[in-house]
């Protein structure tokens, strides 16, 4: 090949590679994809994003066209992220986190003030340390006060303004709040225990106002399983102690079930429990920059899957 043609060939390759390397993603499309993947359906994603369902669908279609692959498997059972979609999902979350970090660092003055954060006790134990990882260091001027309680109690506190931000466990069909995660509610008991077979079934519940209590009782009553309450003391550690001692069974979200307890599956004879949502709530009357900063950190922490084992 003559030298002139060889040089032109190399230059054309470099220009082509430069163009490929410098193609830019529309973060709006990525944010829509992440919302759909996290929520599992277009309707919830459109509500979270403040868009019409048609707009969400068009944005997903546009992203698939740009990447020339199918990201979501659409069927009668709902939406399922494909293997290519799963690969994109992790990278998209990282890119959006970096995008948000840049905007926050470069355009917004450091937030300051006091924030009251409400969480049910099981989330405080299993989620709080990971959820707030790096928050204090990044926001030294924000003072956080933690408020524990049942989800219904904390929802009332948010509505009355006693709590600024709350992460709550709620039935999947309850309106309001921003869904961070969908979780399966499971029966748990002592490893190698036998209490699950007793009748009436000994059940340990954190408190009478526990968000899981109505679902547990409704499932047992629907299957005709008699039960009795062993403990309702408002203390998650005491509740789990009765389970570890094989005195009772209880319910826990799948991601937060203590690793030393056994998940009681179909063989236990206990009825299936409904899915629950972990929702983010902010008080309506006053949303300070400090509260918004904390809410954003919790949102990104949950989306990144930072959960305690």
Image (tube, grey):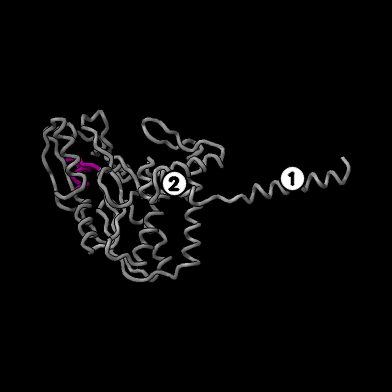
Instruction: Give coordinates of residue 233: x percent, y percent.
Output: 14, 52
Identify the residue under disc 1: 13
Q: Is residue 145 visible?
A: no
Residue 118: quarter of image: bottom left
Instruction: Give coordinates of residue 36: x percent, y percent.
Output: 41, 43
Q: Is 223 left or right of 72, judged from the image as shown?
A: left
Instruction: Give coordinates of residue 41: x percent, y percent.
Output: 37, 40
Secondary structure type for disc 1: helix
23 or 267: nearer the viewer? 23
Secondary structure type for disc 2: helix
Q: Is residue 141 visible?
A: yes
How many labels were placed on the picture? 2
The magenta segment is 239-251
> In the image, is residue 250 part of the stretch drawn in magenta?
yes
Identify the residue under disc 2: 34
What's the mark number on residue 264?
none
Residue at 14%, 39% (x, y): give it: 202
Residue at 74%, 45% (x, y): give it: 13
Residue placed furthest toward the right: 2
Crowd around label 1: few <14 · some 14–19 · many ≥20 (10 Å): few
Residue 27, compared with residue 83, is above or below; it is below
Q: Is 17 left or right of 58, judged from the image as shown?
A: right
Crowd around label 2: few <14 · some 14–19 · many ≥20 (10 Å): many
Q: CA distance from mark 2 to mark 1?
A: 34 Å
Residue at 63%, 51% (x, y): give it: 22
Residue 30, compared with residue 222, is above or below; it is below
Q: Is 215 left or right of 284, judged from the image as shown?
A: left
Instruction: Give coordinates of residue 294: x percent, y percent.
Output: 36, 61
């Amino acid at each position: 090949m003559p030298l002139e043609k060889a040089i032109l060939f190399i230059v054309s390759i470099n220009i082509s590679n430069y163009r490929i390397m410098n193609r830019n993603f529309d973060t709006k499309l990525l944010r829509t994809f992440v919302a759909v993947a996290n929520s599992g359906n277009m309707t919830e994603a459109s509500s979270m994003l403040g868009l019409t369902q048609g707009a969400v669908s068009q944005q997903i279609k546009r992203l698939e066209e740009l990447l020339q692959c199918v990201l979501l498997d659409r069927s009668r059972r709902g939406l399922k992220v494909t293997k290519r979609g799963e690969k994109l999902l992790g990278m998209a979350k990282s890119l959006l986190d970096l995008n948000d970090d840049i905007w926050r660092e470069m355009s917004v003055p450091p937030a300051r003030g006091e924030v009251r954060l409400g969480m049910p006790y099981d989330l405080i134990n299993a989620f709080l340390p990971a959820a707030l990882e790096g928050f204090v260091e990044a926001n030294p001027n924000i003072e956080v006060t933690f408020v524990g309680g049942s989800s219904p109690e904390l929802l009332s506190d948010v509505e009355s303004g006693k709590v600024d931000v709350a992460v709550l466990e709620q039935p999947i069909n309850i309106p309001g709040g921003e869904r961070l995660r969908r979780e399966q509610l499971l029966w748990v008991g002592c490893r190698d225990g036998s209490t699950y077979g007793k009748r009436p079934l000994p059940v340990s519940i954190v408190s009478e106002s526990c968000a899981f209590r109505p679902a547990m009782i409704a499932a047992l009553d629907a299957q005709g399983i008699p039960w009795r309450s062993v403990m309702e003391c408002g203390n998650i550690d005491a509740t789990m102690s009765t389970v570890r001692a094989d005195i009772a069974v209880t319910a826990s979200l799948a991601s937060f079930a203590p690793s030393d307890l056994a998940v009681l599956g179909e063989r236990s004879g206990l009825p299936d429990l409904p899915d629950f949502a972990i929702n983010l709530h902010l008080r309506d009357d006053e949303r300070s920059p400090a509260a918004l900063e904390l809410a954003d950190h919790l949102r990104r922490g949950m989306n990144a899957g930072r959960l305690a084992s």
